[in-house]
C-alpha cells in the first residue's frame, strides 16, 4: 500500500544556509523565504559560517509583510556563529546579535579546533571553547546573554568531549535551550552511545540533519543513522532539520519532505515526526502558534 505524502504545513527548520555566502547556495534569502511560504512552513533559521544573519532575517520578514501582507504566518529567524570572523567567543558580538533579534548562537563551526583537526588544517587560529578541561571564561558571559534572551545554544562543530564540558557548564549557567548540532556528521563524530548519554544526563536536543558533507563536494544520506538515533534517544529529544542549502543536495523543501517521508515510511508515527519538526523547534524559538 502506498504511503500518503506527509504534510509540510507548519514545519520549522532551524538550520538552513542561503545566499549571500562565500560558498554558493541553492537559494538566496528571499527565494528560501518564498519556498517556505509555498509549502506552508512556519519558520526557518538561516545560518552562515561568516557571522550573523539576523539583519537578513529582518529584511525577509519585512519583504514578506510588504509583498504578502497577512496571508501567511511564516517567520525567518537569524543567528550568529562564533567563528574567527566575529572575533570568536565574543560576548559583544553576541549581545548585539541577540538585541537585534537573533535566536540561535552557534559555537564555532569552521574555526573550531575539532573542525580544523578533522580536516587536517592548521589550528593556530582556531577558536577555543574548552581549555584545560574547562570552558573558556568568555563563554560564561555568552551563556548569560543567551539566558537573558531565552535564545538557543548550538554546539556547532566542536568535539564530543568538548560538547559534554560545554553542555554541563551551560546547564549550570541556567540555559534552557541547548541543541547538539548534527552529532551524526563525521566531523563532529558523536557516537550513538554518547548521544544517549548526553540526552540522559542533560536532557538536550539532538539535531539530526538530512545529509553530511563527506568532502570533495560529495554528500551521504544521514537517514539511516537518524532513524537509529530516534529509536535510541527518543523522539522527544531529536529535532529534524536539513542543514540544507547546498547546490549538491535537493532544494531545502524537497530535502525536508524526503526526510520526513523516509521516517514515516520506516515506522516513525506521523505524530512523532510532527513533534520533531514542529513542537521542539516552536519551543526553542519561543513560538506559541
Image (tube, grey):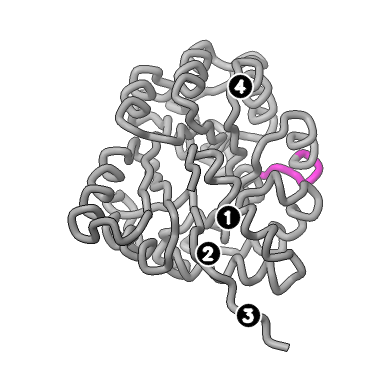
Q: Quadrant of residue 87?
A: top left
Tag nearer the camera, 4 or 1: 1
Which secondary structure lies at badge 4?
helix
Which residue does the numbered mark 2 point to in the structure image?
Answer: 256
Earlier in the chain: of badge 2 and badge 3, it is: 3
In the image, residue 97 lies at what x, y percent?
Answer: 34, 29
Total residue callouts: 4
Disc 1, SS = helix
Query: Which-is-in-front pick, marks 4 and 3?
Result: 3
Q: Which residues are magenta?
A: 189-194
Q: Quadrant of the N terminus?
A: bottom right
| Residue labelled with disc 3 | 4
Residue 272 placement: quadrant: bottom right
Q: Residue at x 44, y 55 (%)?
A: 42
Label 2 – label 1 distance at C-alpha? 9 Å
Q: How much space separates mark 2 and mark 4, taking CA atoms?
A: 30 Å
Amino acid at each position: 500500500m502506498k504511503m500518503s505524502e506527509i504534510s509540510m504545513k507548519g514545519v520549522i527548520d532551524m538550520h538552513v544556509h542561503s545566499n549571500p555566502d562565500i560558498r554558493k547556495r541553492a537559494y538566496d534569502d528571499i527565494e528560501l523565504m518564498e519556498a517556505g511560504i509555498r509549502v506552508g512552513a512556519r519558520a526557518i533559521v538561516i545560518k552562515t559560517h561568516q557571522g550573523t544573519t539576523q539583519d537578513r532575517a529582518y529584511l525577509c520578514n519585512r519583504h514578506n509583510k510588504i509583498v504578502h501582507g497577512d496571508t501567511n504566518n511564516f517567520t525567518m529567524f537569524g543567528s550568529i556563529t562564533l567563528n574567527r570572523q566575529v572575533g570568536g567567543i565574543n560576548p559583544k558580538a553576541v549581545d548585539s546579535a541577540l538585541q537585534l533579534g537573533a535566536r540561535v548562537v552557534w559555537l564555532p563551526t569552521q574555526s573550531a579546533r575539532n573542525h580544523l583537526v578533522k580536516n587536517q588544517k592548521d589550528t593556530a587560529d582556531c577558536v577555543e571553547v574548552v581549555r584545560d578541561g574547562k570552558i573558556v571564561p568568555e563563554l560564561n558571559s555568552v551563556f548569560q546573554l543567551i539566558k537573558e534572551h531565552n535564545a538557543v545554544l548550538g554546539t556547532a562543530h566542536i568535539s564530543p568531549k568538548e560538547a559534554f564540558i560545554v553542555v554541563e557548564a551551560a546547564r549550570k549557567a541556567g540555559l534552557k535551550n541547548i541543541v547538539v548540532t548534527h552529532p551524526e556528521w563525521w566531523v563532529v563524530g558523536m557516537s550513538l552511545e554518547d548521544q544517549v548519554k548526553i540526552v540522559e544526563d542533560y536532557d538536550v536536543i539532538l539535531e539530526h540533519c538530512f545529509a553530511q558533507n563527506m568532502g570533495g563536494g560529495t554528500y551521504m544520506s544521514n537517514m539511516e543513522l537518524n532513524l537509529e538515533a530516534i529509536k535510541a534517544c527518543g523522539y522527544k529529544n531529536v529535532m529534524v532539520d536539513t542543514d540544507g542549502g547546498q547546490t549538491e543536495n535537493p532544494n531545502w523543501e524537497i530535502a525536508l519532505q524526503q526526510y520526513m517521508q523516509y521516517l514515516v515510511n520506516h515506522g516513525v508515527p506521523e505524530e512523532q515526526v510532527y513533534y520533531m519538526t514542529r513542537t521542539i523547534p516552536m519551543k526553542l524559538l519561543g513560538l506559541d502558534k
